Image (cartoon, rainbow, N blue to C red):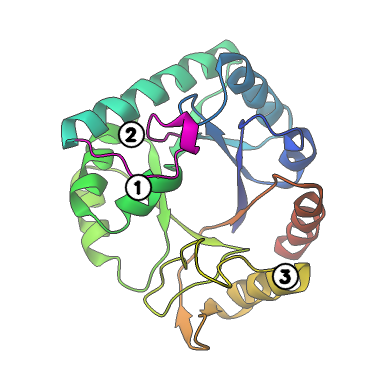
Amino acid sequence: MKLNCDVGEGVVTDKDVIPFIGQANIACGLHAGDAHIMSETIRLAKVNGVQIGGHPSYNDRENFGRLPVALSAIQIKQLICYQLGALQSLAALHQAKVEYVKPHGALYNQMMVDEVIFTAIVEALSSFKQPLQLMILARPDLQKYQQIAQKHGVPLLLEAFADRAYDDAGYLLPRSEAGALLATTEQVEAQVKQLIEDSTITTISGNRITLQVDSICVHGDNPVAVQQIQSLAALIR
């Protein structure tokens, strides 16, 4: 199990976070970042032996990619290929490679509830010379998504979130709802320990659901989070 973190979003803590994670989800310039930030983040990831992933989003910098955008399936494919093509080209400058993709914000959330969007993303990834792995939300019922990905030869990485609350269906509680973000380091560590030791999480209503997890997402956009990431890295090791 690895820790993954959204980076390359212009946050000054990136250099403090990257040495403690296993996977770096690098913003591809549409919700945050630019060519220079992307390149520097790739360099930091390579120096620290961290896997490089693309973090593509809707073209909506004003809202940080957190609001849905109505696009056709072909437009979504173009959006994904455009962003990943740029990241791969910059990675080549550092003799590095992009190994996986984790969509950002609203694109990620919509992917997990809309098979048309999920299929469009999978088809985009399968078009690359070396199909890229796709990171998605670990949930109890993923058989249909696994079938779609397998059909197109795209491996899946299943992730859970260290600092987000879940509903009973295994979805993240919307940020607009009370309790969506775990408030303390103790809560975050307890959720991660439970995932590591028991392969379960406790939902907002107190139920336990089983999750198969390859990677745990942490957020490093504030000084407290940097300390949390360091402690979580020690737990996983």
Query: Residue drawn 18% across and 48% down?
Result: 116
Which residue corresponds to mark 2? Answer: 131
Considering the whole magenta stretch, tell me its main secondary structure: loop
**Is 126 on the left-hand or right-hand side of 199?**
left
* In the image, residue 114 lies in the stretch drawn in magenta: no
Counting other residues with Cα less than 10 Å from the Cα at mark 3, is it few (<14), some (14-19), or many (20 or more)?
some
Q: Amino acid at mark 2?
A: Pro
On the rendered structure, is 196 left or right of 117? Answer: right
Q: Position of residue 41 (x, y in %)?
A: 65, 26
Q: Nearer the viewer, residue 85 or 106?
A: 106
Of the numbered discs 2 and 3, the one sitting upstream in the chain is 2
Please, what secondary structure does the residue beneath circle 1 have?
A: loop
The residue segment tinted magenta is 55-71
Which-is-in-front pick, marks 2 and 3? 3
Q: Is label 1 or label 3 in front?
A: 3
Residue 189's disc is 3
